[in-house]
Amino acid sequence: MLMLYTLPEILLILAAAIIIDWIIGDPRWPTHPVIHIGRLIKRLERVLLASRLSRRSGGIVLTVVVLALSFVVMFIITYSAAAVHSWLGYAVSAWFISTTIAVRGLKEAAMQVYQPLVEGRLEEARKYAGYIVGRDTQQLNEQEAARAAIETVSENTVDALVSPLFYALLGGAPLAMLYRAANTLDSMVGYKNDKYREFGWCSARTDDVLNWLPARLTGLLLVAAAALSRGLSAPRAWGAIRQFAHKHPSPNSGIPESAVAGALGIELGGVNWYFGQQSERARMGWPHRPLEAMDIKRTIRLLYLVSLLLLAGVLAGWLFVYSSFTFKVL
């Protein structure tokens, strides 16, 4: 990407990708690239688990092959489009980068939990919560269903917004798609159960490494978003990151979750159930008030504010670079 376009062009492509996601969201047609990546992972998983490789070695092969193919295929597509015409290259790159982010998709998924909750349809809220979290949802009460949605939006502010844009800035659509492939691998095989503890080790560690810096950038962006939101607390968001983030089992997820909990004045984490087994998740934030369904909408507002801050930053960067270039020419 950096070889194909100048920095001002790249920044405008990122701005277009953010806006496309706001308007269109996850495309139903053509098939979303992540679906193709997921199918590839499943096929390779069956082959590698049946091979003579150890589970850890097979998992390393899986990670390398999926990431390499995702990058190479996307590079060929974007390079070919740019070779036909520069504007086609811009459009194709913006479109594919937009498929690696999911602001609108996260909003829609969370609202499918929120709406039934406020209308008293708990069973329906549990059903939709089950679509976005891995925990058991059949026995969730209203607060627990809301917490599931809030934690999902919080964590995915990194995975589905900041990280893919960060890698798109560094390497365009190919690197953004490589990141999305790594994140998909982690979501499919990065578990710590008997089947995937060794096989998914490389995928999980790769996702942790790729998200390390973007997660910390997200924490700062969430603090800024809280400062722009009436009724939310930026100092409390920052304090929660410093006090609670390191307690999370993930080196990255605790940052956005604690930031959101602090900003809203609620407590996230606590008891979850997985396949009938109780699990105590580190608690994030201070419970200044009970968690409520409306906190889902407040978290969505923070998500959109972060995306707006990123768009503003991208456009400001474009204006600075473009004006500097113009000044030099003059």
Image: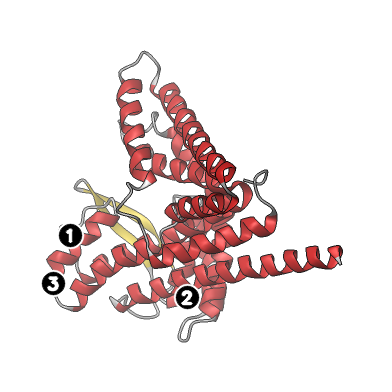
Look at label 3 and name its amino acid.
Answer: Arg
Report the side of 151 relative to 215 (left or right).
Answer: left
Q: Rounded to the nearest whole Å, what is the CA distance between mark 3 and mark 1?
A: 10 Å
Say what amino acid the circle numbered 2 marks: Ala
Q: Which residue is mark 3?
A: 121
Decide which of tag 3 and tag 1 comes sooner along the chain.
3
Please give the count of numbered marks on the rendered protein.
3
Kindly identify the residue that appears in the image at 68 percent across and 59 percent down. 8
Which residue appears farthest toward the top when viewing the image? 52
Taking 164 as reference, is 145 above or below it? below
The percent coordinates of residue 194 (x first, y second) are: 30, 31
Provide residue 75's location: percent of width, then percent of height. 54, 39
- Quadrant housing residue 300: bottom left
Residue tagged 1: 127
Q: CA distance from mark 1 to mark 2?
A: 28 Å
Type of amino acid under label 1: Lys
Q: Residues within 10 Å of mark 1 (few under 14, many from 20)?
A: some
